[in-house]
Amino acid sequence: MHKDSGSKQPHLQHPQKSARHGLAYEVIDVDAFDDTVVEAGPSNVGTATTRQPDYDSVKRTPSPSKSERITKTRPVRDEGAVLRPKIESVPLETPKYGPLIVSPSVFEVDSRVWPPNKTIPYSLLAHALSTLTTTRSRITILNILTNTLRVILQAHPPSLLPALYLLSNTLAPAYDSVELGLGYSVILKAIQHVSGLSSGALKRLYTKTGDPGDVAFEAKSNVRTLVPHPPLLITGVYESLVQISKAKGPGAAKQKQSLVEKLLVAAKGEEVRFLVRTLFQNLRVGAVRTSILTALARAMVMTPPASIRDSIAADSPYYASDDLVAAVKHNPLNRLSEKFTNAERLLKQVYVQHPNYGHIAKALAEGGLEGLPDRVPFTVGIPLLPTLGSPTRSLDEIYDRLEDLPFAAEFKYDGQRAQIHGWKNAPDGSVAVKIFSRHLEDMTEKARISTSLTSYLFFSDSNLESLIMDTEIVAIDPGNGDLRTFQELSNRARKDVQVNEIKVVVCVFAFDLLYLNGQVILQEPFRARRSLLRSKFPPVIPEWRGAARLDHVKSVDSEAGRDAVEEFWQEAVESRVEGLMVKLLDSGQVLTDPSDKKDRPRRKPLPATYEPDKRTAAWLKLKKDYVTGLGDSLDLVPIGGWHGNGRKHQWWSPILLGLYNPALGKLVAVCKCMSGFSDVFYKALTEKYADGSENCSRQNLWDVETGGTPQVYFKPQEVWEIRGADVTVSPVSVAALGLVSDSRGLSLRFPRFMKVREDKSIEQASTPDFLAGMYRSQQGKGGKGEGVDDGDLLDASMESEPEESEIDLSDS
């Protein structure tokens, strides 16, 4: 094996002679491959003896009666040797685990198997992930996650944080911008290198299974080794992934591939499958953030870490005593529900204001659930999840919902939502600024001009110590202040621009204040928060033409009268805004069901506080497009496509679009779309999702539910805003199946592409519940929505629409 001078050499043990064949063998220590990646081929890492798999018998799960056998040798021929030796391999048993699907009330963490300070093998997590793939039941998913986390909390609390990140398919908080940065080819080369299979053999496996994890599992199951490798640990896998993410600069690809190979060599059984799925960022299980937080809360109730057990009060509202746990095992009535509810509410409250698993896991290990909000507090510089608005169809509906409660109607701008944090550092008084997107990504560097504006606010007010604003960054005309489109904001020139050439500038429209001078004001009503915002931060129009501006959103209060609100709505319709955001000014009570005509209808409280991560009825969206049809647009994800006809034969058209189902953690097809696209967009789309690329597959690689089979599947990676005429019941759609009909799903009639939602992640796409709510609202207004869909997720009239008509639509 050739090595450059000075490079680290793999450790080679002394060659062992075979008396029968006169051959010597070198046993390769793969841990020595830190900096150098050997050439791919059947004679290198882990490839001394391989047998070609039977491609017609590829299975997704291993036979439980087989143990994995791995061989890592390299034959060295003596002179005159002509025969290949028979190698006796060492069997490596995959640990056997009990069922995780049982209720936590009857699940026991065996202290003999899981004593304190026992490191947790990655195989436990792989077992949990494998079990998760067998169910769609939310209760079962929660049981599996809860029981897995209970084992970790009892045996090895330091493994909790890595486990949370591995279960959520992330490496760090969203605002830390830590990404694996692994290319498709790097992972496949590593699989080929470790398995010894040719690229053609791997391709045949992929054609058969359609999943890289399944390919790696089958390929690795045929590799043998003389030297058993130490088992992978949860902590070790996570640390290796972090190392991969940190590999930068020249040689990074080889370094990443080397790290991947070391993981694959050590992985056994289901570990291989889920390790590769993790590398591809697609676990294909139904464990979403809400499920993980719920499971963590329940695990803490049942099995708090040993370090805090002695300090738990007998009357704690969060923990189950040994007596209660014993009683529940024999009582079908779950007396743990109150404890679970308290813990879940507390943990979610902390997370939405401080979304950092690392800080939360550390606080839980040190002090448990008691006092958790004080130990993981709301913190300037760490984003909180934003409040979201609920859609409405008309001003009449808004008045029906809010009755006589006062509200503010604000312009809903066509821009990018931004959460701006600013604070003074002690002791020098320097100003720090962070700007976060709607889905919590740190976009401070991308929004430097807004950062400068925030710094100016501190320099102009010596008493200002800290702030958190909720804002919308919008493009405006520098001359007259007219609003411009989101596309103009995204495409504006940023470097080497002469002042007289500046066509678009940024205006930061502030609409809420969440934190001021060390005080959290989320629980203040909107009227009070808005008053503070306007009094402390007046509009700013800098002298320099290209500088960012600060302004308040344009609004009118309902107290000005219905006519004033109607007039303001008409102004919104005629302006370059998306519509209105209606916000409750003061907390009050509203009807539980506005359509309830009983003499004494039930009422419920409606707070005007800021509610992180909630789609609240105190914030109502009224968009101007399709007000007489749909009350809101849908945020959908392109998940597949077909080749077009006629002049569109070289493009993907129509495009299959999907909703995000948070209960399953996957995308579900809802409609096809072929309207609203320009030729330029079609061309760019087809290049982005080139057939056979890492973004486009003939197999359902990304585990989406389609209700049919598109020609190709797209890698889910972007969100589109789509508008339609109405929501219709569909005989084949799987979207919202069971929510309005036991046998039919919902689809969208006359869908039309509006724009790419760069401010939204896949998990923030519209949900089946959201679609079902639109359908019910439509029915309440006399909509039909029955029998319109022709069974192909697309209205028949769309297919027969003349090409000229569609060109007019796309260019309008």
Image: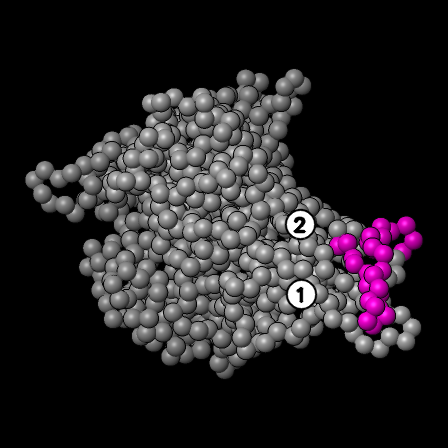
| The disc label shown at residue 223, or none | 1
Magenta stretch holds residue 21: yes
Report the magenta stretch's main SS.
loop
Quadrant in which the C terminus is drawn: bottom left
Residue 593 lies, with reference to residue 644, above or below; the image says above
Examine the image and state in which quarter residue 275 appears: bottom right
Magenta stretch holds residue 644: no
Left or right of 642? Residue 330 is left
The amino acid type, in three-letter code, at marker 1 is: Val
Q: Residue at x 81, y 71 (%)?
A: 20
Examine the image and state in which quarter residue 792 appears: bottom left
Circle 2 Cα neighbour tier, 10 Å, few/some/many (<14 / 14–19 / ≥20): few
Judging depth in this view, the residue of 635 and 335 nearest the camera is: 335
Start-end of magenta stretch: 4-30
Percent from the top left, x then y, of residue 809?
Answer: 43, 68
| The disc label shown at residue 230, or none | 2
Between the C-alphas of marks 1 and 2, the distance is 16 Å
